[in-house]
Image (spheres, rainbow, N blue to C red):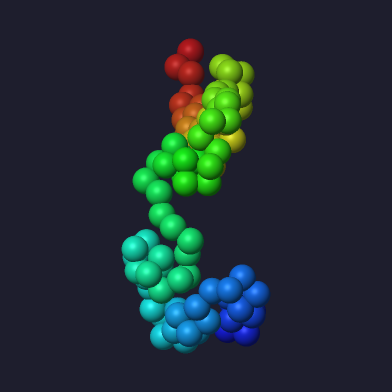
Amino acid sequence: MLSLLTSLAQNWGRNTTAVYNMVQSNQAFSANEAVANHVADGSANSLNDTLSQLGLSGNPQITLSEDLYEQIISALSNSILDGILFLVGVIAIVLDIYHQPSC
């Protein structure tokens, strides 16, 4: 990993010493420290800040959102909800087995 990240830093003109310390010494940088140590180009607080720094603020932005069907499919594919629904199903089957009708 060290040689990969060091070579990537060297190819992109980054601070190889800082990258070496990040891998070997488990050193982390804040956003401002990363910019100061030439590990990152800059920082932005929002999408609009990023677009303006890159000179793309004049381009149109398209906002995408899911329709109702996609929201339902997304909720049903959630692993936590799947586990809960499975558990409810198992409990319902066990209750049906142990609950004998009183006829």
Residue drawn at the location 41% of the way across and 65% of the way down: 35
Residue shown at 52%/81% (left/top)?
A: 16
Q: Which of the pair 13/69 is nearer the observer?
A: 13
Residue 45 falls left or right of residue 57: left
Q: Residue furthest top?
A: 103
Measured from the top left, where is residue 55 in percent x and y? 53, 42
Where residue 61 sits in the image (x, y, percent)?
A: 56, 28
Residue 41 in the image: above or below residue 90: below
Q: Of residues 55 and 22, which is closer to you in this image?
A: 55
Query: Residue 79, relative to residue 21: is it above or below?
Result: above
Instruction: Name the residue at 58% across, 30% down.
Output: 59
Q: Quadrant of residue 42?
A: bottom left
**Residue 32: x %, y % from top left:** 34, 63
Q: Answer whether residue 1 is visible to the viewer in this image.
A: no
Residue at point 49%, 29% (across, down): 92
Quarter assignment of residue 33: bottom left
Numbered circles on residues, count: 0
The quadrant of the picture occupied by the N terminus is: bottom right
Q: Position of residue 89 (x, y in %)?
A: 53, 32
* Image height of 48 relative to 65, above or below: below
Is 19 situated above or below 101? below
Query: Is any atom of residue 75 visible in this view?
Result: yes
- Of residues 26 and 84, the one nearer the viewer is 26
Q: On the picture, is 68 further left or further right than 99?
A: right
